[in-house]
Image: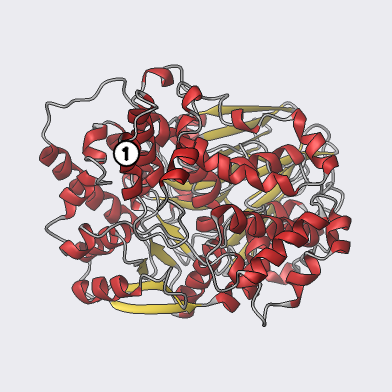
Amino acid sequence: MCGIAGYFQLSEQSKPDIDLIGKMTHQLNHRGPDEYGLYFDNRAVLGHARLSIIDLTTGQQPLTNEDSSIWISFNGEIYNYIELRADLEKAGHKFRTTSDTEVIVHAYEEFGYDCVKKFNGQFSFCIYDKNKSSLFISRDRLGIRPLFYTVHNGRFYFASEIKAMFADNRIPREIDLEALDQIFTWWTSAPPKTIFKGINELPAGSSLIVKDGQLRTEKYWELSYPETFDYSRSIDSWAEEMRARLIESVRFRLRADVPVGAYLSGGLDSSVTTALIKNFTNTKVETFSVAFEDKAFDESIYQTQMSEYLGTNHHVVKCDYHDIAENFPKVIWHTEKPIVRTAPTPLMLLSGLVRQNNFKVVLTGEGSDEIIGGYDIFKETLIRKFWAKHPDSKFRPIALRKLYPTLPVSQAETGAYLGEFYKSGFSEIDKYYFSHIPRMNTTTKIKMFFTPEIKEEMKKYSPISAFESDIPKLFANWHHLSKAQYVEARSLLAGYILSSQGDRMGCANSVEGRFPFLDHTFVEFCSNIPPGHKIFGLNEKYVLKKAMEKELPKEITNRVKQPYMAPDSNSFVQPDSPDYVQELLSESSLEKAGLFNPQAVKRLVTKCTKSVDKHLSFKDNMSFVSILSTQILSDRFLNNFKQAKPLKRSDYKTYIDQSS
């Protein structure tokens, strides 16, 4: 895990701006505080902030090939680099380091742009090819590692985070209302769009080539599902292969020259990864978890139980309302987008705990819910499809009441609510977004707080179709669970789970997360598992539970899934809430930002304050957090953006001057 940044002259060469690349790189120091590197000539400038994990002594970047014609700045890990290196050496390539970075360089020499198809990993990188006078940037298949770009005044800029490009104060900083409309529909914007106008995100599984003044994007991988499934194969057979593949995935993700720990939430997924780590170590596994002062959100009893069962050396950070409110602005600085929940905040505190214990790498369970069918939204889809066949049935919707037995803020206890909320969208049963209509109906309520002018402006947009453009040709023939999984992976997984709750919260404290469930070969395997093996009745991730039943206690495999959440509006309306909350939600601040109706926001704040000891509805909590996070974003990025100072030449442990 590192930070990369740089620019490429689209046409005319120019003298490299060393101060600028120093600012851009330094803006990413949280991603890579161990050392900095720089390459430049009159066409390209590459910067690198390194978190040293593999090849600690000779893996400095930017890194080059033998004749210095190809340069790379790389963020992430190539897990199969040892195997690829052996193949490349057989093909005649000579290596000077033991890093996975150099494997990318020689793979590019050998396979060209198709080199990315050889990689098993989580990555974003930039390759400057001097002979072709071109730039090649690419991002991993699932979108674990971020990569952004823009074009301004004849330059192509790129960086791991948007704030690095904003180090050039000539690049405009402006909210993109269409992206905001998408976020308040899907929880994320659809790449290449970001919350900032003119700033683009490279989509997951895609590469971009910059050559002859032109930009060309190519998708090299797509999540896909079969039209029919093999039901002749027993679930025990699927489970056995799943376990074997997970063991291999964990083995790959333990490759590091520094210690590797694990998150242990008390749920199934992190318990699986932690249990499998024990296959590869003779020492106690170091595990980390977050506990909540508010018992409605706390899972510490299961975390302790699992830690004792596996014999781990366990570390816990406890989070209360004040912790969430105090750290929320820092969270938004790192997410670089509005968010609709506070859930990323405790995860940032958790990565801080990891760093305090001198760990740089942790394995986590993210991705399992999307890939193996763990979310309630998938069960909702199955029930709603079943119900839609007889929409007037009084008995078919009853199954929905079983979905949320532990969720303290759910309104699912009333039959009237079930009927109104989940029956919506039956007329759109054939639309690609059918599975997500209930969630979107809740999220879009945020838009009622916009000013009349913004509401009028947003009539031009169609956020509901944001993820429709790249829908696979055979999508209509897929099982409805497969459709729901695809939409969830395309939207929430890459745009929120792996971003706002994943990469950004780990990198805030210079910690790299690794995701065994998101090995692309494992994802492709899971895509072929019959839906009835993933969700058996209403038992989610059934095949995973079968795969791990001998290695985990029944209390973990059989427990009702508790969605990860954190206290929302309650965190900001306590007597000791930080001053910034009242300031940014004041009439003057809201009018200055020009997005939200001050009177409507005032009524919401009053409602939340009066209900401080209660759990509000999803709609109210989501609206409060969304408005506050947008106000913070506007303040920190548009009004009071803090630029990093340029690095001095002495700050670079590798400083390569190739100017001509």
Could you say which is closer to the camera, residue 645 or residue 628? Answer: 628
Q: Position of residue 294 (x, y in %)?
A: 47, 75
Q: Residue at x 65, y 66 (%)?
A: 608
Give the total of numbered labels: 1
Q: Position of residue 598 (x, y in %)?
A: 82, 57
Q: Residue at x 51, y 74 (%)?
A: 352
Could you say which is closer to the camera, residue 616 or residue 392? Answer: 392
Q: Is residue 167 in sight in this rendering?
A: no
Amino acid type, mark 1 = Thr
Residue with the most extreme bottom position: 576
Residue linked to disc 1: 521
Its colouring scheme is secondary structure
Figure quadrant of residue 469: top right
Say above or below: 576 vs 277. below
Q: Residue at x 12, y 30 (%)?
A: 233
Could you say which is closer to the camera, residue 621 or residue 112? Answer: 621
Q: Residues within 10 Å of mark 1 (few under 14, many from 20)?
A: few
Q: Position of residue 468 (x, y in %)?
A: 56, 26
Q: Is residue 129 in sight in this rendering?
A: yes
Say above or below: 342 vs 317. above
Left or right: residue 227 versus residue 162 is left
Figure quadrant of residue 644: bottom right
Could you say which is closer to the camera, residue 216 or residue 656? Answer: 216
Q: Residue at x 26, y 40 (%)?
A: 535
- The quadrant of the image that shows the C terminus is top right
Helix, strand or loop under label 1: helix
Q: Position of residue 74 (x, y in %)?
A: 55, 50
Left or right: residue 369 versus residue 180 is left
